[in-house]
Image (tube, rainbow, N blue to C red):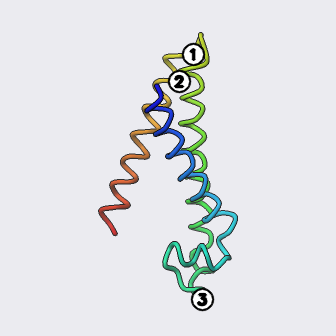
Amino acid sequence: MMIIGLCLFVSFSFHVYAFLLESIWWTSRKAHKVFGVREEDAGKVAAFAYNQGFYNLLLALSSAYGYYLMFFSKEKVDFGAGLLCASSIVQAGAGIVLVSTG
């Protein structure tokens, strides 16, 4: 359970940070540097980044809620396990695509 919790924490933290960069801090130089976007091009992809940020936030929240249900709810353990498993598969798949596309 501790390893699952640690993996969830790392994943949750990464996706919340990505949300902040893409949806809240997109106009900052830090966000541009992280994503390799020139300042003059940042406005052109701002809507895409905003949408992607919320995708990351919802992934983080769904896995955290699944973890909560799985380990702290007596009635919805199976639902929590399914939600945690599904969100983890989506995150792993997205990570593979991200790494493979450079």
Pointer 3 and pointer 2: residues touching (CB < 8 Å)?
A: no
Q: Which mark is residue 40?
A: 3
- At 57% from the left and 59% from the top, the residue drawn is 18
C-alpha distance separating marks 3 and 1: 49 Å
The answer to which of marks 3 and 1 sits earlier in the sequence is: 3
- Horizontal and vertical percent for residue 102? 34, 69
- At 43% from the left and 46% from the top, the residue drawn is 91
Residue that sits furthest to the top in the current view = 75
Question: Would residue 49 be found to the left or right of residue 99 on screen?
Answer: right
* Observer-nearest of 80 and 43: 80
Q: Which mark is residue 46?
A: none
Res 67 → quadrant: top right
Q: To which residue does mark 2 refer?
A: 80
- Horizontal and vertical percent for residue 100? 29, 62
Pointer 2 and pointer 1: residues touching (CB < 8 Å)?
A: yes
Label 1: how many Cα within 10 Å (few below 14, some 14–19, many 20+) = some
- Horizontal and vertical percent for residue 70? 53, 21
Q: To which residue does mark 1 refer?
A: 76
Label 2: how many Cα within 10 Å (few below 14, some 14–19, many 20+) = many
Please tell me whether mark 3 sits on a helix, a strand or a loop.
Answer: helix
* Observer-nearest of 25 and 90: 25
Q: Is the residue 86 above or below the residue 102 in the image?
A: above
Mark 2 residue type: Gly
Label 3: how many Cα within 10 Å (few below 14, some 14–19, many 20+) = few
C-alpha distance separating marks 3 and 2: 44 Å
Pointer 3 and pointer 1: residues touching (CB < 8 Å)?
A: no
Mark 3 residue type: Glu
